[in-house]
Amino acid sequence: MELLVAYQEMIKVHGWNGTAATLGMSKSALEQRVYEVKGSGMRVDTALLIQNYSGTKHFAQAVAHASGGVFYALPEPGDLSDVELHDKFHELYDELGELSREYTEAKKDGKIDATERAKLQILENRMHATIRELMTLMFLINCPLPNPAVSAREDA
């Protein structure tokens, strides 16, 4: 997801006027930041406020994508059980099956074109995120050590 698309999707949740009012600026000022008009640009702290207000993770996803990675939200500690872990394993199995089907379809003509490659890479990114979530769940459920990312959020 590109940054511009992320901004637009986050703003869509409450609309341009609602988001601008929450930030204490006019709709025009918000548009100038989003579309980088007259040397304006979106500040990271403003983008994070919009993301928080929208209840999405679009900005984080766009930054991760621009950095060549993927974003995944860490699960909150609490009443986690092996059921969630089991479900995450099945999600990964489903994604692996989808990757296998897409690969088989893509190589039917003997080569993988740009569109097919993009589809395969989207699946790859989704699987990386699922594996990271799976490992996080494993550690949250079974390790006596606290999750450092969750501890840092609690300390903040």
Image (cartoon, grey):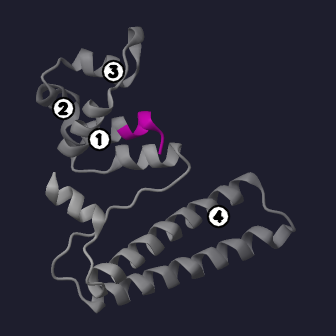
* Alpha carbon distance from label 4 to label 3: 34 Å
* Residue identifier under label 4: 120
- Residue 17 image position (x, y, % from top left): 17, 26
* Alpha carbon distance from label 4 to label 2: 36 Å
* Foreground of the two, 146 or 98: 146
User: Is mark 2 in CB contact (under 8 Å) with mark 1?
Assistant: yes
Marks 4 and 3, the one that precedes in the sequence:
3
* Foreground of the two, 41 or 5: 41
In terms of secondary structure, what is the magenta stretch mainly? helix
The segment highlighted magenta reads: 1-6
Marks 3 and 1, the one that precedes in the sequence:
1
Q: Classify mark 2: helix, strand or loop.
A: helix
* Residue identifier under label 3: 33
User: Tag 4: residue type?
Assistant: Leu
| Quarter of the view holding residue 35 | top left
* Alpha carbon distance from label 1 to label 4: 27 Å
Residue farthest to the top, as pictured? 38
Marks 1 and 4, the one that precedes in the sequence:
1
User: Is mark 4 in CB contact (under 8 Å) with mark 2?
Assistant: no
- Residue 103 image position (x, y, % from top left): 71, 72
* Alpha carbon distance from label 3 to label 1: 14 Å
Q: Classify mark 4: helix, strand or loop.
A: helix
State left or right for residue 121 relative to residue 9.
Answer: right
Relative to 95, is 153 above or below? Answer: above
- Residue 33 image position (x, y, % from top left): 33, 21
Q: Residue at x 70, y 58 (%)?
A: 117
Marks 2 and 3, the one that precedes in the sequence:
2
* Residue identifier under label 1: 10
Specify few, some or many for label 2: CA neighbours under 10 Å numbering under 14, 14-19, or 20 or more: many
Q: Residue at x 43, y 36 (%)?
A: 3
User: Tag 2: residue type?
Assistant: Thr
User: Tag 1: residue type?
Assistant: Met
